[in-house]
Amino acid sequence: MPFRIRYNAPVVLTFSLLAAAATITMGVIGSRGVEWFSVPGYMDWDEPLAYARLFTHVLGHAGWQHLMANLMVILLIGPLLEEKYGSFQLFEMILITAGVTGALNILLFDTGLLGASGVAFMLIVLSSMTSYRRREIPLTLVLVALLFVGGEVAAAVRDRDNISQFAHIVGGACGAMLGLFGERKAA
């Protein structure tokens, strides 16, 4: 009996394919692609594309290494969470995380933002909450917060590189909030 390939996690796989397509587009058309797939450090309220960019910035990446680092996490953790929460709810979680990181970046910083690092950190923190029960804090959440998010806070203070630790921290916070208040799919 032959094996067949199954599109097992439609949101995660489609997101990954769109991010790869955006990276190719940015490489081919240059600055115009960056304009579509990044959030600038300001909001042009008269420009319709500016509103879309609050969400599409998670598809753009600075290059293949940046994309691969994010997809490694997203493709590893995402399918498990898509099974746990359902495709539609995971899609909503990605949109919420993208919108929050994009809007806060515009409000707090004058630099641009692109990449799915916030989404990756949302998934990392959310994965630590898969066994969450009301009125309990999973020890895995505490450890993930200390290791991943705490490491990003330390890096933000110590380093001044082009990686947006801010998006990582906000993505992790979104993951914690979505895990606390999100509904899990019925088993």
Image (tube, grey):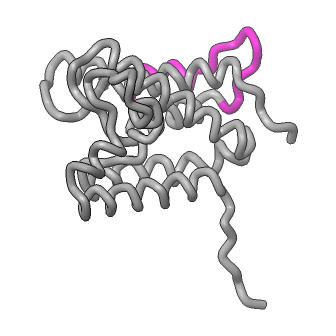
- Name the spot of residue 116 as percent of width and height, x first: 40, 41
The residue positioned 34% from the left and 52% from the top of the image is 67
- Name the spot of residue 66 as percent of width and height, x first: 28, 50
Q: Quadrant of residue 113?
A: top left
Farthest residue in the bottom direction?
A: 1
| In the depicted structure, whether residue 48 falls above or below residue 60 | above
Q: Which residues are magenta?
A: 130-148
The residue positioned 14% from the left and 31% from the top of the image is 161
> Can I make out residue 67 in this image?
yes
Q: Quadrant of the C terminus?
A: top right
Farthest residue in the top direction?
A: 135
- Name the spot of residue 41 as percent of width and height, x first: 26, 24
Q: Please name whichever residue, 155 or 49, is drawn nearer the observer in this view of the structure.
A: 49
The residue positioned 35% from the left and 44% from the top of the image is 37
Q: Quadrant of residue 182?
A: top right
Q: Please name whichever residue, 48 or 56, is drawn nearer the observer in this view of the structure.
A: 48
Q: Please name whichever residue, 73 or 60, is drawn nearer the observer in this view of the structure.
A: 60
Q: Quadrant of residue 148?
A: top left
